[in-house]
Image: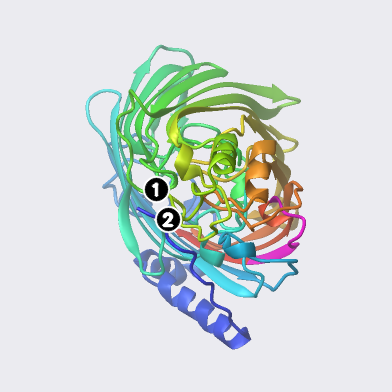
């Protein structure tokens, strides 16, 4: 199977852009919950006691409606159902570029102005079985139009919802289907609120949690209070997790596997073995996790500094996959130029550049490793800061995530309490990523990986600044304005900088 050719982005004037947003707003009307929330607009600023039908987070929900009528227990749940809908519209103005897709190498971000979007809907259902056992199922829908066929940007893709194989036509799939078993060992008991993929009830501070099935590894690993829930926070993918964390997953970002979490008061230790794709950035998963797999471990410590909570996490991963080494691809091409990007007999990214090396000629069982740190700290009850950084070895191609080999991100978020908008927030983030020397050498010869390759390169780290404001319109409905400035797209100083303007509509029910 060859990698799909890049899709040409559409260009829009002001009128067409307005029409697209009208279409987006019409799409959002799919939910009965939005109509119910609109009918209750006069109660937007009311306290929970005056506004029934709320879940434990104080937002409108089916679970709150049932609880209000005595048909559901929000404090000790046997089952729950939640959902979300998110539309993100993106606009890219034209930007300068010394060259684009040089010599036919196809992975440049196209420099003309363009419009893109994603629309997602997710339903989360969970129920308790025997003691400590929980089952969850989450069907999901996506419709998307990425810039330049999702090519040309390394570790700082402007919309975290974008998937590697999405299309404008909506498609449904199973995002999560898991079994979770909790074994309690005492300690302090606390209450867990009702929410998506979370049943309300009591939990002990000393426990072991086992998870098996289909899920996102980011449901368990590398969480961060201020940079992780990107349907409410930053929009750029650089803030979803470490950009250099090439976690095993299919083209949608989901996997199949096993995970364990051991909690002991302020400490937590996690480990997992999960499945990657059969081929890089493709949909089918390789379920032979005894031979090909992604392993990860994480150590976490929660702490309090001057009455404010924080956490430090150390994450390591080790993948064994059928991948290509950049150095091997260069050496193979230099030895025999007939083994180039156009003559590969197996899986390739479809480059028409006959003068370039290609990873397809050198794929074998290779090991890829990385280690990273993840820190968060509340400064006040309304202000928090975060930092992430990761170093991956950079010897082999990106297999499941972004093109970054090393990355960092940092920033802060402030709630709107001081201007009497408690559920509004504003955030400022900065992220930077690098690629290895062998990765640079491969790209300079016209090679491509799953995301980048301009035909040549004047190497510089890729950098992005992301600024957003989230407005809590009414119960369970948020609007966000997001601006991003990206320097050196695809790690290439010959191209850019690029500006991205995003608008996000998010509702929960």
Where is residue 398 shown, x and y percent of the image?
Answer: 53, 41
Q: How crowded is mark 2: few (under 14 residues within 10 Å), some or many (20 or more)?
A: some
* Camera-side residue of 331 and 414: 331
- Asked which secondary structure carries label 2, the reply is loop
Side of 320 where 290 appears, left or right: left
CA separation, marks 2 and 1? 8 Å
Q: Does the magenta stretch include residue 498?
A: yes
* Camera-side residue of 425 and 17: 17
Where is residue 227 shown, x and y percent of the image?
Answer: 62, 43
Where is residue 497 shown, x and y percent of the image?
Answer: 75, 62
Whether residue 475 is visible here, answered yes or no, is: no
The numbered dot on residue 383 is none
In the displayed orientation, state which residue is furthest to the left. Answer: 130
Q: How many labels does the image show?
A: 2
Image point (35%, 28%), residue name: 211
Whether residue 250 is visible here, answered yes or no, is: yes
Image point (37%, 39%), residue name: 255
* Camera-side residue of 68 and 325: 325
From which residue to which does the magenta span run? 491-501
- Asked which secondary structure carries label 1, the reply is loop
In the displayed orientation, state which residue is furthest to the bottom. Answer: 15
Where is residue 69 shown, x and y percent of the image?
Answer: 30, 52
Image point (77%, 55%), residue name: 493
Image point (42%, 67%), residue name: 34
Q: Do the residues labelled 2 and 1 touch (CB within 8 Å)?
A: yes
Q: How crowded is mark 1: few (under 14 residues within 10 Å), some or many (20 or more)?
A: some
Q: Dot 1 corresponds to which residue?
A: 347
The numbered dot on residue 3 is 2
Q: Is residue 417 above or below residue 36?
A: above
Q: Is residue 20 above or below residue 122?
A: below
């Amino acid at each position: 199977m060859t990698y799909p050719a890049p899709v040409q982005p559409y260009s829009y004037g002001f009128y067409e852009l307005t029409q697209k947003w009208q279409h987006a707003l019409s799409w959002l009307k799919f939910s009965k919950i939005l109509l119910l929330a609109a009918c209750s607009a006069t109660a937007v600023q009311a306290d929970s006691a005056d506004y029934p039908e709320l879940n434990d987070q104080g937002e409108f929900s089916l679970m709150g409606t049932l609880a209000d009528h005595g048909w559901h227990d929000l404090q000790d749940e046997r089952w729950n159902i939640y959902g979300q809908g998110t539309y993100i519209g993106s606009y890219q103005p034209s930007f300068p570029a010394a060259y684009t897709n040089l010599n036919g190498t196809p992975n440049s971000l196209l420099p003309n102005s363009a419009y893109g979007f994603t629309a997602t809907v997710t339903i989360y259902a969970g129920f308790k079985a025997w003691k400590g056992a929980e089952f969850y199922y989450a069907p999901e829908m996506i419709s998307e139009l990425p810039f330049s066929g999702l090519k040309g940007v390394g570790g700082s893709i402007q919309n975290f919802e974008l998937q590697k194989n999405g299309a404008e036509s909506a498609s449904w799939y199973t995002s999560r289907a898991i079994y979770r078993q909790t074994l309690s060992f005492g300690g302090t008991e606390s209450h867990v609120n009702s929410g998506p993929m979370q049943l309300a009830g009591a939990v002990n501070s000393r426990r072991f949690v086992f998870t098996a099935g289909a899920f996102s590894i980011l449901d368990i690993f590398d969480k961060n209070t201020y940079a992780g829930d990107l349907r409410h926070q930053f929009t750029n993918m650089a803030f979803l997790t470490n950009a250099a964390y090439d976690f095993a997953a299919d083209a949608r970002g989901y996997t199949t596997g096993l995970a364990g979490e051991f909690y002991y008061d302020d400490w937590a230790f996690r480990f997992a073995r999960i499945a990657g794709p059969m081929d890089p950035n493709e949909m089918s998963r390789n379920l032979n996790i005894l031979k090909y797999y992604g392993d990860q471990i994480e150590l976490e410590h929660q702490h309090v500094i001057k009455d404010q909570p924080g956490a430090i996490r150390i994450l390591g991963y080790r993948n064994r996959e059928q991948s290509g080494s950049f150095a091997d691809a260069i050496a193979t091409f230099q030895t025999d130029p007939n083994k180039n990007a156009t003559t590969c007999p197996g899986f390739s990214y479809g480059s028409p550049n006959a003068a370039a090396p290609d990873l397809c000629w050198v794929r074998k069982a290779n090991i890829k490793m990385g280690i990273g740190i993840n820190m968060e700290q509340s400064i006040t009850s309304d202000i928090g800061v975060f930092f992430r950084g990761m170093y991956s070895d950079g010897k082999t191609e990106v297999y499941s995530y972004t093109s970054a080999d090393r990355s960092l991100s940092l920033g802060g978020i402030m709630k709107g309490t001081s201007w009497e908008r408690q559920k509004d927030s504003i955030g400022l983030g900065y992220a930077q990523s690098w690629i290895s020397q062998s990765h640079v050498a491969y790209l300079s010869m016209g090679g491509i990986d799953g995301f980048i390759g301009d035909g040549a390169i004047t190497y510089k780290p890729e950098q992005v600044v992301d600024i957003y404001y989230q407005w809590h319109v009414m119960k369970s409905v948020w609007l966000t304005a997001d601006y991003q400035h990206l320097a050196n797209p695809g790690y290439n100083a010959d191209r850019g900088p690029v500006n991205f303007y995003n608008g996000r509509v998010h509702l929960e029910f």
